[in-house]
Amino acid sequence: MEQEVGLRQSLINEVNSIRNLSLIVTFTGLVFLSTSIFFIAIPASNGFFNIGEAFVYLAALIGGPITGAIAGGLGASMADLALGYGIFAPATAILKAAEGFAVGLLFHYGKRMKKWLKFLFIGIICSFLIVFSAIFVNQTFEFGLSLYGSEPTFLIGFSRLIESSIFPVALAFSGGRTVIMEIPGYAFLIIALILSTLIVLVVIFLKEKGEMALSCTIGGMIIVLGYFFYETVVLNFPVGGAAVEIPFNIAQVILGAAIAIPIVSYLRELGIIHSERHVEYSDLEEDPIETNEN
């Protein structure tokens, strides 16, 4: 009986290993594509806004911390290199890997976290949002976006990875225009207050979705703060230029979570993916296979 149980457990472990490898490969590719195909450049910091965060979170929420770390770090850093942002690639590899690992770890094992610790994280995140936005409350920000082609809403910021055979050069890369938007500083404070309130409500009332949101938010703070310190300390960028990127990075986190959480929840409802959170054989008093047979 023990040999049979051991064999079954070995087969289960092997299947899980193959599954995890396939998830890593798939999500690494998705992170790379989502980061490199559509982006908006941020000239003030030489960085760019993208939707790759959504797939980093999907990798972490579905596959766990290791899958999230590898897919996030490898996929996003390869995109930086492919797009000509190689100066950010080392930081991206470390920060996105840490982000993916943190999201996966917090979500899959967060049930063991004390409630007071969760609210401590929430308080830190909300305080950061409010304090940062309050610093610039008397400022006015100008944001410029370069729009290309006859369909700017579709071709905005498309990368040079797109072949001319797919989009004619004249359509994709000529006829550029620039749109300047002025945003008062107090608008960021209002947004920060609204976001802080939403974070608290989501975590309290939405249970598993709230835990996903908290995990993504905590992981997202790694890239928000990490890129700021990398740009100011390592690259010696002006603090003002690096600070301009913070709202965009926060927006990436929010957009990524807004895309990833409903997808994961819907896949769970359909039974396509199953929750494996908080359960390990070492945590059980007896082997579940043997228990079922008895």
Image: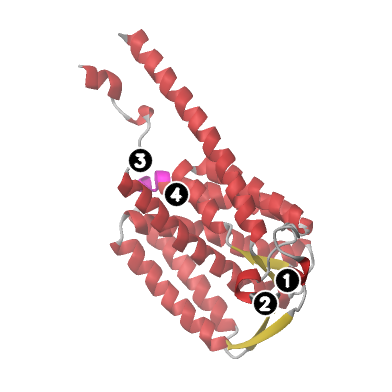
Per the rendering, the mark at residue 171 is: 1
Between tags 4 and 3, which lies in front? 3
Q: Residue at x 46, y 29 (%)?
A: 16
Q: How many marks?
A: 4
**Sooner in the amino-acid sequence: mark 4 or mark 3:** 4
Looking at the image, tell me whether mark 3 or mark 2 is earlier in sequence order. 2
Residue bounds of the magenta highlight: 108-113
Circle 4 crowding by C-alpha within 10 Å: few under 14, some 14–19, many from 20: many
Q: Quadrant of residue 34?
A: bottom right
Residue 286 visible at all: no
Give the mark toward the camera: 2 or 4: 2
Tag 1 or tag 4, which sits nearer the N-term? 4
The image's mark for residue 2 is: none
In magenta segment, residue 253: no
Left or right of 264: which side holds 74? right
242, 30: nearer the viewer: 30
